[in-house]
Image (tube, coloured by chain):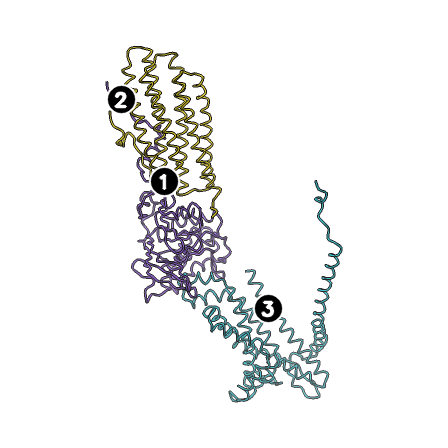
Chain colours: A purple, B cyan, C yellow
Amino acid sequence: MNPPETTSSKAPPSGAADKTTKEQTDMSTAGDRSPERAQATRVAAKPGAGTGKAGHGVKLKDLNAYYGNQHAIKNVTIDFPANEVTALIGPSGSGKSTVVRCINRMHEEIPGARAEGRIMLDDLDVYGPNVDVTAVRRLIGMVFQKPNPFPTMSIFDNVAAGLRLTGTKSKDLRNLVEHSLQAVGLWDEVKDRLNQPGIGLSGGQQQRLCIARTVAIEPEVILMDEPASALDPISTLKIEELIDELKERYTIVIVTHNMQQAARVANSTVFMLEGEVIEHDATNKIFTNPSDERTERYVTGKFG
Amino acid sequence: MSVAASTLPEISARRRVTDKVMRGTLVAGTLIALVPLVLILYFLIKRGVSAWTTSGFFTTDPTGSFFGNPGGIRSAILGSVVMVALASVIAIPIGIGVALYLTEYGRDGWFANLVRYFVDVMTGVPSIMFGLFIYIVLVKAHVGGSGFSAWKGSVALSLLMVPIVIRSAEVVLLLVPSSLREAALALGAPRWRVVARVVLPTAAPGLVTGSLLSVARGMGETAPLLFTATAAFALTFNLGALMNSLPVQIYTDIQSPRSEIIDRAWGAGLALVVIVLLLNVVARFIASRSRQA
Amino acid sequence: MHETRHKFHENLRALEVQALDGLDIVIQQLDRALESISYQDVELAGMVVADDDRIDGRYLEVHQGILSLLARQAPVATDLRIVAALLHVIRCVERMGDQCVNIAKLVPLSGYEAPKDKDILDAIERMGRLARSQVSQAKQAFADRNTELAHDLLRQDAEINRLNREIFRRAVEVGDNLDMREWAMFMILVARCLERIGDNTVDIAEQTVFVVTGLFREFADASTPSEAARPL
């Protein structure tokens, strides 16, 4: 008489849960540095994805930046993949804003500041010997922490400002302004008052206006330096949704003090400390199982 | 329950007295300081208005005969306007230009700080020095073919106005938030466009205010004109010739033995004060409108 | 240096202690349940059944505490893994408590003064001791974050599984006495409850490894046999 095969009968969790534990032996993409893989496991892409233009990635190689004698950024090497959102997190003074300002060469506008190293936008070295700084900035746009629409200009003029300030002729300015405002979700709210001053809008609207202004010059990369930290929570969420949509067409780098925002919005996250990159990995990994002890202590709030 | 908890302590009598004494002293001091101003205005108005009502006060020139109707102050007013206008055309663009250099390009450099120091010094220089300077450099040297002339008066005035324009323009330009400059730079604008399309338009109301105040100052200066444009009486618009002006007119008239001419001086004084007052009011109006916007 | 988020981490630690202390109650229940089996003590069995409320209550408290922490504190990284693990752990505690109740409920059913087979009784006793030590070891492994101790649990569990199979075989061969056979059937059920308790301790061990390494790997089940699960 053969005894029945005893199943080591675990009290099973609900059926669905059982399946996921079997498929997902790694709760984090352990050691996987490629965020593309993380994206592949994501829920199916929104309709219309993939119809955007080809992406442009940014690579930093051995970047060093100084404020006078102070060595603020030390040998930073980061790869920002095309059409993805990469977040830079870290405590105050870690250098994340400086890194971002080096990418569009705003860093050197500060007296006494300089940067060395290579920053590649596709094949173009942004710090090349004969590169025109204004051309770089037309390709790499920037959105600032405090919304800064031009106070003497109307909403329409604000969006068109990028073109007018760079002396770019546009065949159909009105259309371009409309598209830019639509891209940031402002069109319906302002289409009847395009001639009113830009500063008459609410904080969240002003920030979206600034994003529209940046989008209107059709850059390839958009840098965001704490874009939502001056806004109320609802506006913040709207901006985050906007970032999610924008990444279809642009490569986005976002500096944020708010870790939850990085967790919500970014495909991959870079943790910086005292001017150096400590860890750079898929956001999922950084927030479920970071490799470095310092990253762990920062994201769990044990310091910073 | 403690007894003291139910009411707050009252102000002591001593404190009340001290309060009143302080307040009384300050009010008294203010009133005393205002007295000369009020007196000046009172005399000006009392004696000036009576001059204003003489016929032809604003429509004739002070070319009247020694014994007859002395004439009005038309050429003085128009002469002041013309010379100050020319001085403004010189001083305001230069002043704003220097201020732009100081805020946008020089910033904290050693040269910019040197310029700032000299501008500060110039605001303190007595206006007669400008007159003397132009007298020697332009008048005695007969630059431009003649000695005294109106345009040299304008130059002297502009020297006086430039530091004022620079000072006020620099303050206003610094008030333009650097975030606006950053935004424009980040869009890829060259610096000159940032200045022309963003900084200047934003600062415009303040720049206008500062300029108007410098114009008001220029209107009232006597000493530079004494050495350059001197006195003339006929109406002329020839900048190469002598030209009349309100301050000089007053200066000349006050020394006359005839009482009608002295009255005319009061009338001219009132006119000058009214013009300066109007300029100030307009300047403040523009400033307050831009603050509301 | 004073740690930031001090209160949050204290709350998390307290929650963990609350969950793990549930294992102490489980041990108590287990001891009593097995005693009631050995001595056919119906009263004791009744106490076990009644006391399960303590475990259920603790489950609800810990569960609520975890929800609150998730909603308000947004834990990440290790903290997040601890919170997720505690959900599993408290569920294991609750199930182990239920198994003890199942054992206790068998006491009145297995009859008064029924004839007992000594071998089976010995095996049950040994299983009971093993189960007890496994629960205790699971608690220590999790509290200390000791992955070696956790892996060792699998080895011990293999022994419990073996004993389970042995009891089954003996029960089948127990003889013709109807009463004895009936009693032996009930012992099979008791053995299964103990075996399930063992499995739950292995679950807790898996969670320990997850918290420490961030990787979740099933130690062994029907589809992924390990060396320890040898076929008969």
Comparing B46 with C150, the one in front is: C150
As measured in the structure, the alpha-carbon distance from the residue carrying label 2 to the one carrying label 1 is 37 Å
> As shown in the figure, which amino acid type bears the numbered disc 3?
Val
- A9 displayed left or right of B221: left
Which quadrant holds residue C37?
Answer: top left
**Residue B133, disc:** none
> As shown in the figure, which amino acid type bears the numbered disc 1?
Val
As measured in the structure, the alpha-carbon distance from the residue carrying label 3 to the one carrying label 2 is 103 Å
Q: Residue shown at 70%/70% (left/top)?
A: B33
Report the residue marked by disc 2: A4
Residue B221 vs A170, above or below: the answer is below
Task: Name the front one of labels 2 and 1.
Answer: 1
As measured in the structure, the alpha-carbon distance from the residue carrying label 3 to the one carrying label 1 is 75 Å
Residue B32 vs A212, above or below: the answer is below
Comparing C33 with B222, the one in front is: C33
Report the residue marked by disc 1: C212
- A178 displayed left or right of B120: left
Q: Secondary structure at mark 2?
A: loop
Q: Residue shown at 72%/49% (left/top)?
A: B9
Query: Do marks 3 and 2 share a chain?
Result: no
Q: Residue shown at 39%/30% (left/top)?
A: C136
Comparing B125 with A71, the one in front is: A71
Q: Secondary structure at mark 1?
A: helix
Mark 2 falls within which chain?
A: A
Task: Name the front one of labels 3 and 2.
Answer: 2
Report the residue marked by disc 3: B282
Mark 3 falls within which chain?
A: B
Quadrant, the N terminus of chain B: top right
Which quadrant holds residue A119?
Answer: bottom left
